[in-house]
Each structure stands twice: as C-alpha cells, then as structure tokens.
Amino acid sequence: MRCTALVLTLLLSPSVFSKTNVTGLWNTFDGNGSLLSTVIVKIENAKLYANIVAVHTPGDKNPLCNQCKGDLYGTPIVGMQIINGLTLKNNIWQKGSLFDPKTGDSFKGKVWLKGEKLLVRGYLGFLYQTQYWEKALSKDR
C-alpha cells in the first residue's frame, strides 16, 4: 500500500512531468545555427532568471558589452543577466524582461518549453523574434 501511494505521488507530482522545468544550462545559437553562448536558467522566488556563463564566438571569451547603455556599458558579457523576473502562467514564463547584450536593448519576453527546445521570445510592440535554445550537456560545451 505504501509503495502504491509513493508511486502515485511521484506520478502525480507536477515537478516530475512538468512542462515548465526550464532550469539548467542551455546553448544559444545565431540565425545560421552557430553556437553563441551557454546560459544558466534558474528559478528564484518563483521568478525566472538567466545569466550567460560562456561565450563561444571566435575571439575574446569574455567580451565587453559595448552596445550596453548606462552602468552596463563596458561590463563583461559573461555573468550578465539576460532573463529577468519572468513569472509562470499557463506553462509560459512571462511578464518580465529579456536583455540582448548584442544590441544593449531590453524587451518584454516569454519563455516556454516545446519538446526538447527552450523557446525564448522577445517583443517590441506587436513584433517579436523567437530563439530556440538547446539543453547543454555541460558548461564546457
């Protein structure tokens, strides 16, 4: 009886088969499919955050953000927060902001899982762009 109750509890637990478990390391890609960076996604106080942990483009492995404005200008991109405070609603993380260090701009955003991919969508008014991130095996990848 206890074994059955344990199995049922695990099967019915939302964390086991959650469509919203987006935490961990993710690889980002440019429009041509080239690996750009590795990002760590985490949940803190029921909000979603992500920081760049590695840059995989040729050249400097920790370039400075020359497109950033204000206090972020000239700061290292590795460690930079690019998803800030999204909240979960209907299996979609939303109502927070996304930051693009390439342009130095912030956008409204949404994040959700579709199969094995993490979809990260930034909005500028009614226009949007979606990136498809893939789960990373380790920080070195």
Image (spheres, rainbow, N blue to C red):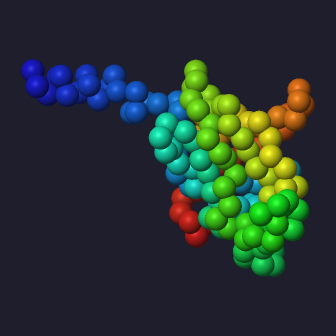
- Residue drawn at (78%, 78%), measured in percent from left and top? 60
Total numbered circles: 0
Image-based side of 100 in relation to 141, left or right: right
Note whether 63 is above or below 118 in the view shown.
below
Q: Quadrant of the C terminus?
A: bottom right
- Residue drawn at (80%, 41%), measured in percent from left and top? 107
* Residue 16 visible, this orientation: yes
Note whether 92 is above or below 60 in the view shown.
above
x then y, percent, for residue 79:
64, 65
x then y, percent, for residue 69:
85, 59
Residue projecting furthest to the bottom:
59
x then y, percent, for residue 129:
84, 38
* Residue 34 visible, this orientation: no
Looking at the rendering, which quadrant does residue 93 occupy?
Answer: top right
Image-based side of 55 in relation to 53, left or right: right
Residue projecting furthest to the front:
70
- Residue drawn at (25%, 22%), measured in percent from left and top? 8
Q: Quadrant of the N terminus?
A: top left
Image-based side of 32 in relation to 95, left or right: right
Q: Nearer the viewer, residue 110 or 45?
A: 45
- Residue drawn at (53%, 63%), measured in percent from left and top? 138
x then y, percent, for residue 136:
58, 56
Looking at the rendering, which quadrant does residue 35 occupy?
Answer: bottom right
